Image: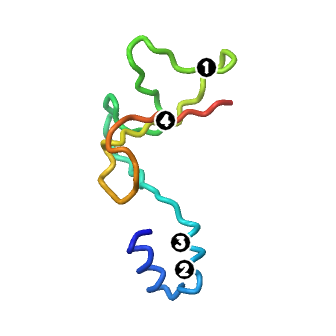
Amino acid sequence: MTNNLIEAIEAKKLSKYKEFICQSTRPAIDIVRKQNTKPSLGCSRLGGKPDLPIGSQWPMQKSVPYRFIGQINFAEIPPSDIDIPSAGLVTIKLDE
């Protein structure tokens, strides 16, 4: 739990809800869209097409391709107290 959250709870006089709020919160990162930039290979993005190694195929399920939701490059995320990798690329996909 971050000190910022505890300070906000106390500043807003929500102390009687502190335990519930602290149990309900989850680590998060903000995704901020950069205007007028072309995505580069390996960068974080939502939508578009995934970056795949040469020769690899996008996964299919029953001959239907999964939907590409986005990809996150952990090296682009500023250091924080959230326990996530500092490097690597994760692709988010959705099956129908």
Q: Which mark is first along the chain, 2 or 1?
A: 2
Judging from the image, what secondary structure is the residue with disc 3 in?
helix
- Tag 2 near tag 4, CB within 8 Å: no
Residue labelled with disc 1:
60
Query: Residue 9: x and y, percent?
Result: 48, 81
Judging from the image, what secondary structure is the residue with disc 4 in?
loop
Q: Residue at x 41, y 40 (%)?
A: 72
Judging from the image, what secondary structure is the residue with disc 2 in?
helix
Residue labelled with disc 2:
18
In three-dimensional space, the C-alpha distance between marks 3 and 2, rounded to whole angstroms, equals 6 Å
Number of numbered markers: 4
Compare residues 6 and 64 and report the one nearer the observer.
Answer: 6
Q: Quadrant of the C terminus?
A: top right
Q: Which mark is first along the chain, 1 or 3?
A: 3
Q: Residue furthest top?
A: 55
Q: Which mark is first along the chain, 4 or 3?
A: 3
User: How packed is label 2: few (under 14 Cα within 10 Å), some, or many (20 or more)?
Assistant: some
- Of circles 1 and 4, the one toward us is 1
Q: Quadrant of the N terminus?
A: bottom left
In three-dimensional space, the C-alpha distance between marks 1 and 2, rounded to whole angstroms, equals 45 Å
